[in-house]
Image (cartoon, rainbow, N blue to C red):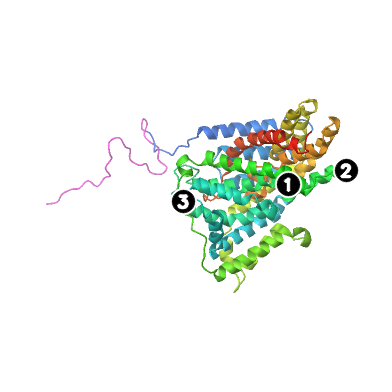
Amino acid sequence: MSVDVDTRPITVVGEHPPYEEGTRPLPGRPGPRRPGVRVSGRTTWAAALVVDVAALVTVPDGLSLDARLALLAFGVATVLWTLTDLDAGYVALGAGVLATVPVGGQDALFASLGNDVVWLVVGAFVVGGALARSGLAGRLTAAVVGRARTVGGTLWLVTAAIVPLAFLVPSTSGRAAVLLPVHRALGEHLDGPRAASGGGGQRRVTRALALLVPSVVLVSTVGTLVGATSHLVAVDLLHQATGETISYAAWALWGMPFAIAASALTCLAVQLLFLRRDERRRAVVVPAAERAPWSRAERVAGAVLGLALAGWLTEPLHGLEIATVTLLAALALCAPAVGVMTWKEGLGEVSWSLVLFVAGALALGGALVSSGAGDWVVGGLFALSGVAGLTSPLAVVAVLALLSATAHLYVTSHTVRAIALVPPSLYLAASLDLDAVAVVFLVSIGIDYCLTLPVSSKALLVFADADDRGDGFAPRDLLRLSAVLLPAWVALVVVTYEVWWSRTGLAL
């Protein structure tokens, strides 16, 4: 006996059978569901702000096309970095293209890949990887924070260790290169399980550490005359205009107390903003400093690092830039039969997404400077501030601090900011009968603040998380930190002037 079996597909009540390609659903029946695109409120705000930025750059008179494009690219990049989850490197590269290519500046875009900062980043990652593989980074880390018992205590010890480096390694780029492997080694010891929040599973403690290290590197720059090229430029412009100068000792007398206070304030802000209370108090076990004899790899890595430090310190004597010295160190650490790893392994340590991020950001920053957009914004703010009509010394200090501290948003080069701000500041000092030395020093302190966007400093670019690996900070993290630190910085300038500078020969 045969049994007929119905082999037609079963249709569950409430569902609809699949339609063959090219067929249309019957009237009254819905077609197959198609994935929808959900637009978040943050994305909506980002789109609206992009439109606003595009409209605003068309308003001012007297701006060239390249200046308008540079401002547009800068504004759009800031919005996208802050309010969207787009890859930071993608945004930076797109902004660099927008700021350069439409006005025939594609050569400047491609030249950014050959910038010394790009090669510094490549060399720093190779050196950092070699120090980690050799075991020297772990030994140095244990020596720095071996007595730490909590995450918060470790961050305070890291801060205390970074500040004196401003005297030992004058370049912020050099200090960042030295500290990158220490940051990586510390991240391995301090971090617990990945947090549910924090941007794509980014580890919270590592992110806080990645923000802390370059931020303290930058704010501690205030402590020494040779901490930044802009200091030397400012003092030279002061001497040309008035015949006066600021000695190395005088700068340290005025700058180091501020640098220590600013570094402590930065450490406190990072912990409060990016770590929960239980995370700050969490116990950590950082291995004690190694007492065993150094291995061959550690000896090689230590020798190369020592030579690199000597090269960074003696740059004025031999003329080799920080990036060149770093690359030479990277080559030595990967040398056959001598180094601690192969060249292929060294290249594997490089974050190439970060390299492209740096190139795009540099192209954008260069466009702001070369087009005159940065000078236009800073000059306009200086004219509109009303500082020339102020009579209270504290009010003058506050306005000068605010103008110079926000200048990094429009003029990304430290040195160019000094060139743009010091001459009008000297004119202001002469017109209001103010002490020129005090005015130049106050402006220089403000110029040293550059913590809002990664493009504002080479040290920040080294620690940015351009490929979402979770071992750096995102641009929105830096913006969040700066929203607190920028007003705190201005307030600290006013307080320090009142309680220290005005009483030690730096009164207006």
Residue corresponding to mark 2: 243
SS for dot 1? helix
SS for dot 3? loop
Is residue 283 depicted above or below 342 in this figure? above
Prevailing secondary structure class for the magenta stretch in the rendered image: loop
The amino acid at mark 2 is Gly
SS for dot 2? loop
Mark 2 closeness class: few <14, some 14–19, many ≥20 residues within 10 Å: few
Q: Kindly tell me whether residue 65 is visible in this rendering.
A: no
Q: What residue is at 57 percent from the left and 62 percent from the top?
A: 131
Residue corresponding to mark 1: 252
Which labelled disc corresponds to residue 325?
none
Question: Which of the two residues, 399 or 294, is positioned nearer the viewer here?
Answer: 294
Residue corresponding to mark 3: 284
User: Does residue 185 show up magenta in the picture?
Assistant: no
Quick one: label 3 or label 1, which is nearer the N terminus? Answer: 1
Magenta segment: 1-29
Is residue 137 depicted above or below 280 in this figure? below
CA gap between label 1 and label 2 equals 20 Å
Q: Nearer the viewer, mark 1 or mark 2?
A: 1
